[in-house]
Amino acid sequence: MFLSDKCTFRSLSKNLGNSLKAFDCGNQDLNDFFANDCFNYAEQLIGKTYCFTLDDNPGEIVCMFTVSNDSIKANTLPNSRRKKVTKHIPHEKRMRSYPSVLIGRLGVSINFKKRGIGKELMNFIKTWFIDRNNKTGCRFIVVDSYNETGTINYYKNNGFIPLFSIEEQEKEYMGLGIYDNLITRLLYFDLILLKP
């Protein structure tokens, strides 16, 4: 495994950020977030960014992601979607909302694309939140993915399911009009599927 064998996992701080090379994942919006906004998110306790750096070249970032607390509010979902989300939850444990972690941003450096690092990174994030040393309950991982075929397929290939089956339903939930563009799509992964 490339990340575990050849990289170091690090929490990103401004001091560390100043010692790293500029990160380029091929998406200007993500690049700008990781270069500037992620530090403000951390300072305001809104999100925390982590990275893997190359052991042979500690200034080079292989991949990065930002996470924050979130929840899936099952009681606000249409009945069919609520049933899909809660199907693995015993009836007596059902609640109005379920603790989740949001992957706010995620990117792999263009220098390391097409090596399976995106899948390895997602597997790392999933197991990170079911580790017995995790300090809080977390049932789901959610992502507000760019509504682009490649990005949506990345998450689907990693076991994520769209929270809404059709875009029209998601637009209604988001308070958008029928002709508005849906820039992002909500997807989720049920961590109970990985629990031994």
Image (cartoon, grey):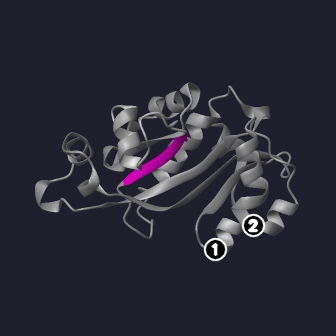
Dot 2: element: loop
From which residue to which does the magenta span run? 140-145
Identify residue for label 1: 44
**Residue at the bottom extreme?**
44
* Percent coordinates x, y for residue 164 in the rendering: 34, 38
Find numbered disc 1 in the image and state the secondary structure of the residue it sits on.
Answer: loop
Kind of residue at badge 1: Gln
Q: Tell me if mark 1 has few (under 14), some (14-19) or many (20+) residues whose alpha carbon lies within 10 angstroms of its own.
A: few
Q: Position of residue 175 (x, y in %)?
A: 41, 49
The magenta stretch spans residue 152: no
Does label 2 or label 1 sit earlier along the sequence?
Answer: 2
Instruction: Specify whether residue 19 is in view.
Output: yes
Overall secondary structure of the magenta section: strand
Judging depth in this view, the residue of 99 and 33 nearest the camera is 33
Is 144 inside the magenta-drawn segment?
Answer: yes
Quarter of the image containing the N terminus?
top right
